[in-house]
Image: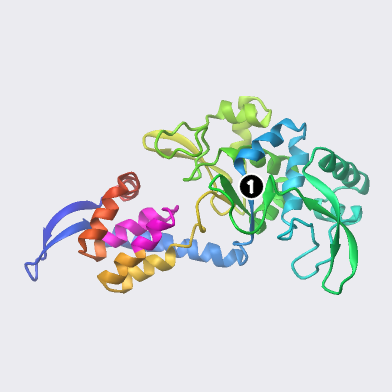
Amino acid sequence: MANYGTYADVETGEVIQGLFISAEQLEVRQAYKEQLKRQEQARGNTYKFYYVDQINFKGVADMGLTNKQLGQYLMLATYADFDGTLLKSTHDKTPLYKLTDWGNVLRVTYQTAGKLKDTLISVGLMYETTYTDDAGRLHKAVSLYDRYIYKGRMRSNSVVKVYRTSLRTLYKEQGASNVGVLGRLLPYVNYNNVLCFDYADTHALQPLKVKDMAQLIGRRADDAGKIIKGFTYEGRNVIAKEIVDGKQVYKVDAFLAYRQTGHITDTLDAVDAVETEGPADAQDAVKATTETELKVTDVWDVVDAVETTETPDVVAMIKENEAYLERALALFA
């Protein structure tokens, strides 16, 4: 595993303090980073997303929607423009208003689309409006209430990003009901993408158990367990079981929904800078990462920073994030 300490270079006799790993471990970590890059490139438009307000979204559970209706709502939200208006696509700015269009998007009948539209409007998730296109023509339209889902600038820290391409893929592979299952769990995603009661607290982790998730999604515990095991898209687990700080936890796939600032692979460029540029640049890269909150892949980045620079400030900065460093070390055990 990686070891932090003081070492002497066998060739120069220079005394070096830092974190050291074997060439084999370095190769494994580099392969992991390349895998993330390939996954990002394969998705192409992964970074098109909307925000779910976690505090307000808890109230959606009391609106009487079925999991299927909630999943359909989340799917429709992937067509929202920055003002909340549902549009056919980024290239076709015609409002997604006709029930036939809703039926095509959701893969339901005209009648089902009509009932869903009435329901979502009546519970206060959407509203009828008008939309003026680029040519000045006025259209009937439907828009999202931004209390629950919105696009644009982040308005609070209690939000989770949901990625458009991944959500649409999940809907296609798993159906509306399972997308709705994810929707009921989104208010409980914490900064490390762990499902827990104390989503705003990264220190006193109280992770959700299967029985807790079962209650939230309205299913029996054994049914919820089966859903979690078979809950995949593109071969990825939507919810994965992991061990964090000695506790068994369930994490939401970060390419589907992500709680932290930026995106899961945002720090890869910073890692490259740490590895290929001098200590001063390495220090700046790590500081920039710290200022925007440590992300999923940052446990790799902090190790790289300590390895490639002797700058005391960098070492001190890493030590201040001991919890992340411990997780990084565990990855190389």
In the picture of the structure, the residue carrying the numbered disc 1 is: 52
| Magenta residue span | 286-306
In the rendered image, residue 303 lying in the magenta stretch gets the answer yes
216 shown above or below 232: above
Quick check: is 107 in the magenta stretch? Answer: no
Is residue 260 found left or right of 326 in the rendered image? right
Quadrant for residue 34, please give it.
bottom left
- Position of 133 relative to 51 (above/below): below
What is the secondary structure assignment of the residue under circle 1? strand
Answer with left or right where residue 28 lies relative to residue 145: left
Residue 26 placement (x, y as % from top left):
31, 61
Label 1 CA crowd tier, 10 Å (few <14, some 14–19, many 20+): many
Residue 174, position as x, y percentages in the image: 70, 46
Colouring mode (rainbow / by chain / secondary structure / one colour): rainbow
Q: Main secondary structure of the magenta part?
A: helix
Residue furthest right as drawn: 111
Residue at 77% across / 34% down in the picture?
66
Residue 258 seen by the camera = yes
Question: Would you place residue 90 above or below residue 246 in this image?
Answer: below
Note whether 196 is above or below 302 in the view shown. Answer: above
Q: Is residue 142 left or right of residue 317?
A: right
Q: Nearer the viewer, residue 94 or 256?
A: 94
Residue 7 is drawn in which quadrant? bottom left
Q: Position of residue 238 (x, y in %)?
A: 58, 45
Residue 21 visible at all: no
Tell me which residue sits at (76%, 70%) in the image. 91
**Across the whole image, how many numbered discs are drawn on residues?**
1
Q: Position of residue 332 (x, y in %)?
A: 31, 51
Amino acid type for the residue under numbered disc 1: Val
